[in-house]
Image (cartoon, grey):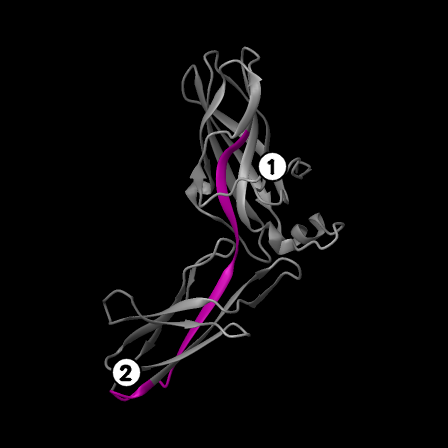
Amino acid sequence: MRGRIAAACVVGAVATGIAVAPAAHAEGRGDIRVTKTVVNGGSNVIVGVKDIKRFPITMTIKDNSGVKGVSDVSAFNTTNAHGPVDHLGTTCRKVSTTTSVCTATMQIDPAWIDSYGSGNEGWDANSVAGNWQVNATVQANDRDYWISDRIALFKVKRAATLTTDATPEPVGKGGTLTVTGKLSRANWTDLKYHAFTRQVVKLQYKKPGGSYSTVKTATTDSKGHLRTTVKATASGSWRWAFLGTTTTMKVVSTGDAVTVK
């Protein structure tokens, strides 16, 4: 395993989502450039409390002499420069005499996040979540090189869980159905899931063979619990759906089928 990577500077840019972005600051020599960067296939990087998360950073690199390789890749939060991530290595595939596609494998271990900044006063492991950027140094066969800052923007998010329970089952037609649930998200300080409070969550319903549509919304209480009532008119399935935040993944619960008699 390569050494742990820590951010070397603080950058104030904020991403609105996963995106390919031009280098905000760069230096080097010659015509070598990173022309495209995709992080995790274009998806958010979701980190829970147990499993190590590995994700690729894929860079398309061009130089008139051909691409020698990538000498360094780093990633970190754009607001606070926290970057508890390992660079496990990079492989390159030549696609033409001037172009190569290089893929860096990155790794975030939730068990390491808290200790990464434990020596800093006021450290909060969960501040790692949010908007991140990628920096890379690329090299050409003719000794050209380019040190690129912010060649891509992406999001690292805390994993979340959501449950649904609709009662009674079965329920009489026209009767009152009570739908409850709980929204929780990963806490990287103690590696447990904690209640996600004061969040708006959608209650959705679908008939057998149909698709889900939103019926109403509810807000999680101080323990992350959800509770609402609806009139039972037809058999079908109920579920809660959370759209997510900048730092927490979106999540949809498993549907709970209820028969109306």
Q: Which mark is residue 88?
A: 1
Q: Which mark is residue 150?
A: none
The label nearer to you, 1 versus 2, is 2
Q: Which residue is mark 2?
A: 232
Label 2 packing within 10 angstroms: few (<14), some (14-19), many (20+):
many
261 or 238, which lies in front?
238
Identify the amino acid type marked 1: Leu
Residue at coordinates 67% horizontally, 39% vertically from top-left?
6
235 or 125, which lies in front?
125
Q: Which of the two discs, 1 and 2, labels the residue nearer the N terminus?
A: 1
| x then y, percent, for residue 39 | 47, 39
Check residue 173 for magenta coloring.
yes
| x then y, percent, for residue 56 | 50, 39
Q: Which residues are the magenta region?
A: 149-176
Residue 238 visible from this viewpoint: yes
**Measured along the vertical axis of the image, is residue 240 above or below residue 108?**
below
